[in-house]
Image (cartoon, grey):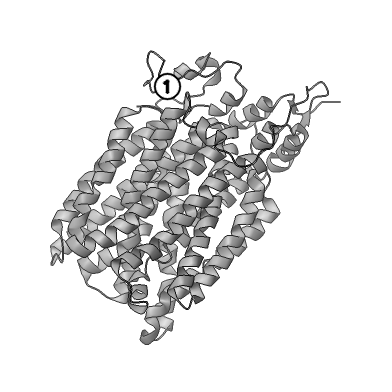
């Protein structure tokens, strides 16, 4: 009688099975789609308030500063949620946090929609941010840990077009309400858009309960080889079993929240990776939220202020330029690499921000459409370039044991940049108008410099094997050539543990 198709003796066997691509089929593709569904809700909830900022400002008589507090509250919540969520995703597992964070979305979306005063609106936006912070690192960890190495970068980068699909949808939802609700009620359309976010959250929560399984790599790393084999059988449909002579795998010690995991991100081989992911993530987020969140106002500046323009303009920008740029970036990931995508994208957005800012207020006739095209090109370059790369760099740069903490820290840095962008834009445009974009160009320029200086490329590298190496990692500060793209200073035998597609690094 034939034995099982996949015999497991160590946690590394599980990682090898998934990363080599030998484990495929079953529900694994559905699990990746469900994880992307979480990204959809994250993006929808982040930006569903974008259309209503002008009306909220009028209704609640906000100053530029209090407007910034309203828009940034979700970022502060996301920052805290990411730090705690990333850590506990590594300690408690991906699945438990993945199921729990949906409750935040449902409650917060409905709370924001009916908030009678500014204080409650800020409180529910903060709660929504905590849910997003919990969800983002877990969703990306699932995508990475259910994908083979040779396509992992492309799969993880799919979160970017999903983001723009969600943002475009948040405006598309408003169109039927625009025609159904009397003009006198258009100042409350934002409540419909925000409240609708509870619907996809409920759907994703039900689908997750039906199809989702824990990450087999995480389960194996916790010493549960039997659980990992069961997940492989259910999620991939392969006949996996634990060998009778498999040695026992000790479970990592269970500890409370400490700085140990985050401290490790800045030690040895991981220091450069963490700095690069943090700088790229925070700078791309600053430029995006300063522009993307205020697309309704930018559209009104270019084409004239009206409710319909404030809906249709951002919807077209996101669906046409954001989604296409995101898919282009995902398709080019394996060829160019994550770092090069960030570098080239930052170069483009730096130039575009300066040009759009110099065009300034109220261009007439053809120049208005030129300005609109430049805004679209900015969104395309951002989406296809650095938009995804801060989180993608973090997701692909750490092994299973550190992936939650690494993506959580990167998510926190991203929210720092986003908060700065959300606070920066209303204050600066209040003084300089669209010329504030010239000053904003400093952000992508800093990201460009970081990508030029730190030459780490994770695409095509099987970093999960670093959990099972028997030799201590080399500190890049003492290595004779720390800035090589291949990062071979960290591997005793890189030819036997790497699976790099041709052309994955520039």
The residue sitting at 33% across, 44% down in the picture is: 283
Can you identify the residue that label 1 sits on? 486
Q: Quadrant of the C terminus?
A: top left
The residue sitting at 33% across, 50% down in the picture is: 286
Please tell me whether residue 256 is drawn above or below residue 272 in the rendered image.
below
Instruction: Give the image quarter of residue 392.
Output: top left
The residue sitting at 47% across, 24% down in the picture is: 269
- Percent of width and height locating residue 435: 17, 57
- Percent of width and height locating residue 42: 50, 56
- Percent of width and height locating residue 431: 19, 62
Q: Quadrant of the N terminus?
A: top right
Q: Secondary structure at mark 1?
A: loop
Please tell me whether residue 168 is drawn above or below residue 463 in the rendered image.
below
Q: Residue 86 versus residue 136: which sits nearer the camera? A: 86
Label 1: few (<14), some (14–19) or many (≥20) C-alpha neighbours in 10 Å: many
Q: Residue 266 versus residue 237: which sits nearer the camera? A: 266
């Amino acid at each position: 009688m034939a034995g099982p198709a996949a015999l497991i003796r160590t946690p590394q066997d599980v990682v090898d099975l998934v990363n080599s691509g030998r484990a495929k089929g079953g529900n694994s593709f559905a699990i990746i789609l469900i994880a992307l569904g979480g990204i959809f809700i994250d993006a929808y909830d982040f930006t569903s308030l974008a259309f209503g900022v002008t009306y909220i400002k009028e209704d609640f008589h906000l100053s530029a500063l209090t407007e910034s507090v309203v828009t940034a509250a979700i970022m502060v919540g996301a920052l805290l949620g990411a730090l705690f969520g990333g850590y506990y995703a590594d300690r408690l597992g991906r699945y438990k946090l993945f199921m729990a964070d949906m409750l935040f979305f449902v409650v917060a979306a409905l709370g924001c929609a009916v908030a009678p005063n500014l204080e409650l609106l800020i409180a529910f936006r903060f709660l929504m941010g905590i849910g997003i912070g919990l969800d983002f690192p877990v969703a990306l960890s699932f995508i990475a840990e259910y994908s083979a190495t040779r396509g992992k970068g492309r799969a993880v980068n799919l979160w970017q077009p999903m983001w723009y699909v969600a943002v475009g949808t948040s405006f598309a939802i408003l169109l039927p309400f625009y025609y159904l609700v009397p003009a006198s009620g258009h100042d409350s359309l934002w409540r419909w858009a925000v409240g609708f976010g509870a619907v996809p959250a409920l759907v994703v929560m039900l689908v997750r309960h039906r199809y989702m399984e824990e990450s087999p790599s995480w389960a194996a790393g916790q010493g549960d080889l039997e659980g990992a084999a069961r997940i492989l059988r259910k999620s991939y449909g392969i006949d996996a079993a634990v060998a009778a002579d498999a040695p026992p795998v000790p479970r990592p010690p269970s500890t409370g929240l400490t700085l140990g995991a985050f401290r490790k991100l800045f030690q040895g081989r991981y220091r450069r990776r963490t700095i690069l992911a943090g700088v790229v993530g925070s700078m791309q987020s600053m430029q995006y939220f300063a522009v993307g969140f205020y697309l309704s106002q930018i559209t009104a500046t270019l084409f004239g202020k009206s409710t319909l323009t404030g809906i249709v303009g951002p919807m077209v920008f996101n669906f046409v330029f954001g989604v296409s740029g995101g898919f282009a970036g995902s398709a080019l990931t394996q060829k160019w690499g994550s770092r090069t995508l960030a570098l080239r994208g930052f170069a483009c957005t730096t130039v575009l921000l300066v040009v759009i800012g110099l065009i300034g207020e109220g261009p007439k006739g053809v120049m208005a459409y030129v300005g609109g095209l430049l805004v679209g090109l900015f969104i395309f370059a951002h989406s296809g370039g650095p938009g995804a790369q801060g989180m993608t760099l973090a997701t692909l740069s750490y092994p299973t044991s550190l992936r939650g903490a690494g993506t959580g820290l990167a998510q926190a840095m991203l929210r720092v940049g986003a908060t700065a962008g959300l606070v920066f834009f209303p204050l600066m445009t209040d003084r300089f108008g669209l010329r504030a974009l010239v000053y904003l160009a400093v952000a992508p320029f800093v990201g460009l410099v970081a990508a030029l200086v730190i030459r780490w490329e994770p695409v095509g590298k099987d970093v999960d094997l670093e959990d099972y190496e028997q030799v201590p990692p080399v500190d890049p500060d003492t290595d004779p050539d720390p800035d090589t793209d291949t990062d071979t200073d960290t591997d005793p035998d890189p030819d036997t543990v790497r699976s790099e597609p041709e052309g994955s690094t520039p």
